[in-house]
Image: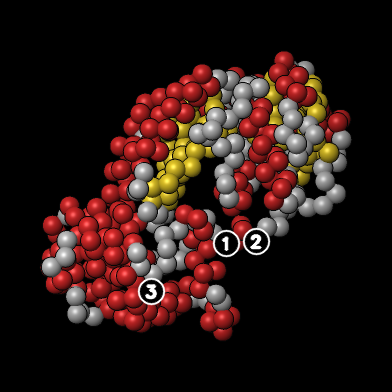
Amino acid sequence: MTMAGVNRAPHPSSLADVLDVVLDKGIVIDAYVRVAVVGIELLTIDARIVIASVDTYLRFAEAVDRLVLEPSEKGEGLPGLIQDMQSGGAKAKTRGAIQGAKEKAQDVVQSIKGRDDEEEDENEDRGQRRQGRGVPAERRAPERG
Amino acid sequence: MLLVHGLLRAQDGAVVDSVNTGAVRPRVITAGPLAAAVSEAPDHEPTADDAVAHLDLLVALVTDVPVLPMPLGTTARDDDAVRDEVLAPAVDQVEQQLAAVADLIEVRLDLAFDNDAIVSDIARTDPEIGRLVARARGAGFGERLALGEEVSARVADHQAALAETWTAELAGIAERAALLSATESLRRNTFCLRRERLADADAAVARIRQAAAGRADVEYVGPLPLYSFLDTFSAAREPEPRSRWGW
């Protein structure tokens, strides 16, 4: 049997992606046969929640704002700024402003989601909420602000 | 109780016994021209490990022979139930589907973009962005949101353009290609290949990794059974002949 090359993995690295492949997928023989598909109790299935893009838009606005305007104000070239951003320097500069915007955005998201478990959400860790996008942690861009 | 993992041609049934994926001890049940790869069902609800083991078994099989995957958790009472209720009633349908996918496999390619790098590309190359930023700076929440929406759309466009460029060679090797999903930072592509082209696909993906370095991480998975293209090949089945009156 040929084994997968070093370049290729036999299955996705995250469980959510494995389930995305195998759950409810494949051939269905006949509606009348006495075979059963037993339930899968895995919380990761429920983790794929689509939330509004407000938070995304604000993060993009912040990122492009830094990249476009700050060079002329500081007389610094773009490469330097990118390096600055990558080293975390830019994070502190905008932390206060964007944090306020994010809180506002989360109010909007809350209203769009229409959930009435506000108290639970307030206590919910923000990192856990981000997992709702279904993107494995190692793939997500570092969180700013 | 048995878990039914996938269906094969009876002539390929011996492959099931030679597979050693560790987590599952598969065996084969045959009936006429068909075979089923089964294993003893665990005495608990399927877990994450069972999901991975199910997929690993199918990957091991499809590497060498055609296999039609059953949904995870498909169970049958015993060997007779597999023969009488899974294999026998659908023999024509399954034979046709196995013939249709005989030489084909699926590989998936996830591109996980570094959006800092993508936004940098856009800020550097799109003159419109500077004007939009200037207009939004110091403005209200709504203007900043509009700016972010504009940038988000450009990020999606740029990701799509990069992905198309990077995967062009792989798409040329593939029989079919599809975009399974696209989110803020992840584009999941899937490709239907002839099994004999897998090495070519591997080489193409190695070049994709080089091209995408600094802008996207690449996850390359396969060979999978034709999960994403099953409907395509099932649809190729000839319809039942009808009378001239339409029934």
Q: Earlier in the sequence, mark 3 or mark 2?
A: 2
- Residue A44 percent coordinates (x, y): 61, 58
SS category of the residue bearing label 3: loop
> Circle 3: is it few (<14), some (14-19), or many (20+) Cα within 10 Å?
some
Q: Residue at x 20, y 60 (%)?
A: A78
Q: Residue furthest top?
A: B11
| Chain label for disc 1 | A
Is A117 situated above or below B42?
below
Q: Which of these two is toward me, B247 or B17? A: B17
Instruction: Note whether B225 is above or below A34 in the view shown.
Output: above
Residue found at x 55% / y 20%: B103
Q: Is residue B246 left or right of residue B64?
A: left
CB under 8 Å between discs 2 and 1: yes
On screen, residue A40 versus residue B183, left or right, reads right
Q: Which residue is mark 2?
A: A43
Q: Chain of mark 3?
A: A
Work out how far the residue at label 3 is from the one at label 2, CA to CA, in angstroms. Answer: 28 Å
Which residue does the numbered mark 1 point to in the structure image?
A47
Tell me the CA gap for discs 1 and 3: 24 Å
Foreground residue among A49 and B199: B199
Tell me the residue that label 3 is attached to.
A145
Q: Is residue B67 left or right of residue B200?
A: right
Q: Are marks 3 and 2 on the same chain?
A: yes
The answer to whether marks 1 and 3 sit on the same chain is: yes
Dot 2: chain letter: A
User: Nearer the N terminus, badge 1 or badge 3?
Assistant: 1
Q: Which mark is residue B147?
A: none
Which of pointers 3 and 2 indicates the residue nearer the eye?
3
Kind of residue indicated by mark 1: Ala
Q: On the rendered image, what quadrant is the C terminus of chain B found in? A: top right
